Amino acid sequence: MGAIDPTERAGVLHRLADAIDDNAEELALLDVRDNGSPIREMRNDARVASAQLRYYAGLILQLHGQTTTTSRGRLNYSIRQPWGVVGRIIPFNHPFMFAASKIAAPLAAGNCVIVKPSEFTSLSALRLGELAADILPPGVLNIVTGFGAEAGDALVAHPKVRRLAFIGSAQTGRAILRRGAEINVKSITLELGGKNPLVVFPDADVDTAVEAALRGMNFTWQGQSCGSTSRLIAHAEIYDELVTAVGKRLDEMRSGSPEDEATDTGAIVSEPQLEKVLSYIAIGHEEGARLVAGGTRVTDGDLGKGRFVRPTLFADVDPRSRLAQEEIFGPVLAAMPFRTYDQALEIANNVQYGLTASVFTRDLAIAHRFAEDIEAGYVWVNDVSRHTPGTAFGGFKDSGLGREENVEELESYTQSKNVHVNFGR
Ligand code: NAD
């Protein structure tokens, strides 16, 4: 891609975005059948993917070097050059969105890309490869399917892949860092898991907070999102009201076929993921948390043949318990009360992760103080889940390294080279 003139490169990315828009319904359906998330959401994923391609196409001419003041007769400038081959390893939860949107920045920066989709959800990435074959030059985009320990490892261990970006669990991310370092020096960025807090102060509007708790947990796609606000931390004054209202709304959510437009919550992606979710529900009971809603697998009718788990809420969860500490990546929300600001912050920060956080309050001082104090890469005040296009997304602590969805991501797919010229005065 680096050999293509930047404006022509932008045109290529726009043509790929057009092809995605033209085939969005088919791409969304492939994901629905592969990962069990509802059609409405998977359509949106296709839209996000083409929008990201257009965003990075528009940024190509913003890849600037610098000139630096130096002595007379000398010139110092820097240029940005692509790495060459970039490896992108992606997870199962938004298969097409990640496959298509995460090639945008590396291609815009002039690299070739090898995408390794999840072994559970490879179909839409393969279709992307077919669509791109008529648009991108040969060899520029490669889709390599397979298991993590084989295809993923081969990509990490290849000495010519110097730049890797990984989206997945913290455990795999750490293994990839280790493995890459055994081979040579690589630039590896990581978008990892989360156990994100949604903190509600007593002055917040409870109805708004209820909506946010439901939306933030992404129950529609079974809570399978890194950014899901899976810990609801509410002030004792409004805690009971909030927990009861969220529980009631969860009971009303309709589990259904992911192909049905009216479905509120779809199916879990795979058998191992289903077992993981059910095991955490058992852990919640063992740890003495109070089950408010859900907590069961759907066993009757057609849905009983699938992997449907009712949206689940546990209340009175001990902040030090496994239910409060570990990422489940399923439809299980853990609620816990607090009494003081310091207590809320202590609970919110006391986990290994630091991806997103959300705070609900009408008090500007508390909102800004919380945004400053919280250990998270993306903070919402009186909102949840929204990614503002062009802003940096990424994690603190074990939630990751590096930032995506902005100019920084584009630049991360280049290496800076400094040139010092003596023109002889
Ligand atoms: P995972 O870590 O099991 O797998 C992710 C990808 O890594 C898959 O393609 C897998 O095949 C591959 N892989 C596994 N072992 C590997 C190895 N040894 N070497 C190379 N590749 C390997 O994650 P998952 O279960 O697919 O996805 C869920 C996780 O992803 C959750 O932790 C979630 O929070 C995280 N996630 C993070 C973000 C983010 O932007 N921060 C977004 C979505 C998902």
Image: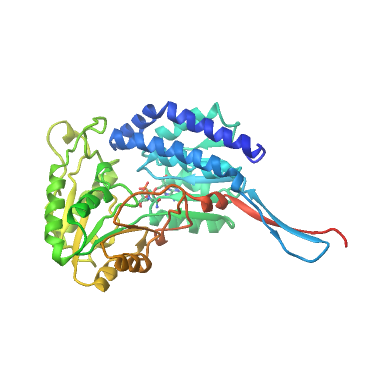
Q: Is residue 394 left or right of residue 198?
A: right
Residue 404 screen position, x and y as percent: 47, 51
Colour scheme used in the picture? Answer: rainbow
Which quarter of the rendered picture does the N terminus lie within?
A: top right
Residue 276 vertical position relative to residue 182 in the rendered view, above or below: above
Residue 156 screen position, x and y as percent: 52, 50
- Residue furthest right in the image: 425
Q: In the rendered picture of this protein, how many numbered marks are placed on residues?
A: 0
Q: Residue at x 31, y 37 (%)?
A: 41
Residue 94 screen position, x and y as percent: 37, 41
Q: Is residue 273 left or right of residue 338?
A: right
Residue 384 screen position, x and y as percent: 30, 52
Residue 146 appears in the figure: no
Depth check, front residue: 208 or 120: 208
Depth check, front residue: 236 or 301: 236
Residue 147 vertical position relative to residue 237 in the rendered view, above or below: above
Which quarter of the rendered picture does the C terminus lie within?
A: bottom right
Residue 421: quadrant of the picture: bottom right
Residue 123: quadrant of the picture: top left
Q: Is residue 126 left or right of residue 255?
A: right
Q: Residue at x 54, y 28 (%)?
A: 133
Q: Residue at x 14, y 38 (%)?
A: 299
Depth check, front residue: 39 or 379: 379
Residue 161 appears in the figure: yes
Residue 374 vertical position relative to residue 120 in the rendered view, above or below: below
Q: Residue at x 57, y 49 (%)?
A: 413
Depth check, front residue: 210 or 325: 210
Residue 93 vertical position relative to residue 423 in the rendered view, above or below: above
